[in-house]
Amino acid sequence: IKLGTDTVNYNPNFRIYFTTSLRNPHYPPEVSTKVVLTNFMITQEGLADQMTNFIVQHERPKLAKQASELVVKIAQMAGSLKAIEDEVLKMLRESK
């Protein structure tokens, strides 16, 4: 792994944990698909969803990777849709 100008060996067993005092931190889809987020102020249903995602990542990594790619693709498409909507509205404004 390149860290600045240095090359650093990567150990697949490496883990790092971060905490935040933010009640509802927002991370872009690109980040959310590469990390495991655990919200300790969560409902039982939400915790079950998180645990299901963790199990899928462990038991069926290819499926989990496909799901992550779809989340990123959906986010990109939503951004494209917003840009197209803005362009259409701009064209409508300028046509008057």
Image (cartoon, rainbow, N blue to C red):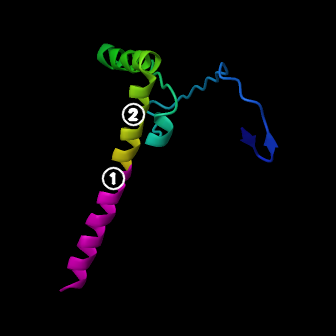
Residues in magenta, as a range: 76-96
Residue assigned mark 1: 77
Q: Secondary structure at mark 2?
A: helix
Task: Name the residue: 36% across, 16% down.
Answer: 52
Nearer the observer, disc 2 or disc 1? 2
Question: Image quadrant for the C terminus?
Answer: bottom left
Residue situated in front as seen by the camera: 64 or 34: 64
Q: Badge 2, how many Cα within 10 Å: few under 14, some, many 20+?
A: few
Q: Amino acid at mark 2?
A: Gln
Q: Are marks 2 and 1 in contact (CB under 8 Å)?
A: no
7 relative to 52 in the view: left or right? right
State the image coordinates of residue 15 (x, y, percent, origin top left). Answer: 64, 21
Q: Quadrant of residue 11?
A: top right
> Height in image: 83 above or below 73?
below
Task: Name the residue: 26% across, 65% down.
Answer: 85
Residue situated in front as seen by the camera: 72 or 16: 72
Which label number is shown at residue 66? 2
State the image coordinates of residue 53 (x, y, percent, origin top left). Answer: 39, 21
> Height in image: 26 above or below 5?
above
| Residue lying furthest right | 6
Question: Image quadrant for the N terminus?
Answer: top right
Query: Could you tell me if residue 22 is visible in this image?
Result: yes
Which label number is shown at residue 61? none
Q: Is residue 94 magenta?
A: yes
Residue situated in front as seen by the camera: 8 or 96: 8
Q: Amino acid at mark 1?
A: Met
| Residue lying furthest front | 62
Task: Name the residue: 40% across, 15% down.
Answer: 51
